[in-house]
Amino acid sequence: MKLFNLILRGLNKALSKSKKNILLNEFSDFEKGLANRYIETLMDDRFYIEENPITPEQFLAQSKEFLQENKHKKAVLIAVDHMALFKNSKGDKKGTIDAAVEGINILKKEFPNAIFILLTQLNRSILLRIADKDLNAQPNRGDIFQSDTMFHIADYLVVVHNPNRLGINQYLKVNPDHYPDLEEFFTETEGVSKKVSFNTLGNIFYHVLKIREGDVVFKDIYIEKVISENLEMYKNEKIDLVTKAANYSNKLFLLPGTRIISPNEQTITSFSRSSIALSIKFKGVTQTGQPGP
């Protein structure tokens, strides 16, 4: 994605204005202040962006060179957005993605201060399982676009999902005792089993598919309320909540570009990505990619 488009997308979120209004209408003094604050977050010489698609071999060579130059730093963050944009060098997309992931696995062992974040999307198989109150509707490792290799190599693997966008209103069917912290999203209990579903309207779901060093049983669902204010108004006016949720859902991210490397003196321990996509998640990166509290 071009830098212009990334900045336009960032202003869209920072100002809560449509891209058309941003391009065609003059900013108020207040909006100019918000825009300036957003632009200041981009003026960080620790960020490096590769805008053009490159092959896995080029990416790995550039990454290794940069990691070598910054091996004394406490943490170096490398993000790929997204994996399908690598230039085909292996004859097919799957082979290309697998080559990149396998090379990344070698680099993360060679450079212990390196943190890799790989963004991709789900394949279409999840569209065949759209159903209310059905556990099969949730993402699984087989839904990862083109490459199961990422599941094997990733330390953390998270799918960020908007089931309401797929037309699901009551999501999954679970034992409420397993998710006491998500009670506010429960539907009413049903039948003898006393199981519940999750309301999807205005909510984004984070499915944790893997934690390499986690316990056998770990918390696998998190929910972010992305539209909480005036929800009844949205219902009454029949506003496209799918579009709104998709727009709001990106607010946690982050680091734009095909390749972003951020060497700094603080340990970066968290990450999150929104929209229907797969990601690797750590804990606490702010919107600009700088270490959060």
Image: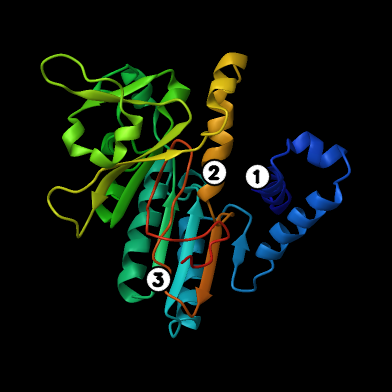
Q: Which residue is mark 3?
A: 114
Q: Residue at x 45, y 80 (%)?
A: 68
C-alpha separation, residue under disc 3 versus residue under disc 1: 29 Å
Residue 239 in the image, given as x and y percentages of width and height: 61, 20
Write down the residue under mark 1. Answer: 13
Residue 157 is left or right of residue 118, and the answer is: left
* Label 2: how many Cα within 10 Å (few below 14, some 14–19, many 20+): some
* Nearest to N terminus: mark 3 or mark 1: 1
Determine the residue located farthest toward the bottom in the rendered image: 72
User: What is the tally of numbered marks visible in this picture?
Assistant: 3
| Mark found first going from the N terminus, 1 or 2 | 1
Q: SS at mark 2?
A: helix
Q: On the image, numbered disc 2 is attached to which residue? A: 250
Proximity of marks 1 and 2: CB atoms separated by less than 8 Å = yes
Query: Which percent across, then down, holds residue 36?
Result: 77, 59
Residue 115 visible in the shown view? yes
At 80% from the left and 51% from the top, the residue drawn is: 30
Res 111 quadrant in image = bottom left
Q: Residue 126 bears which disc, if any?
A: none
Q: CA distance from mark 2 to mark 3?
A: 24 Å
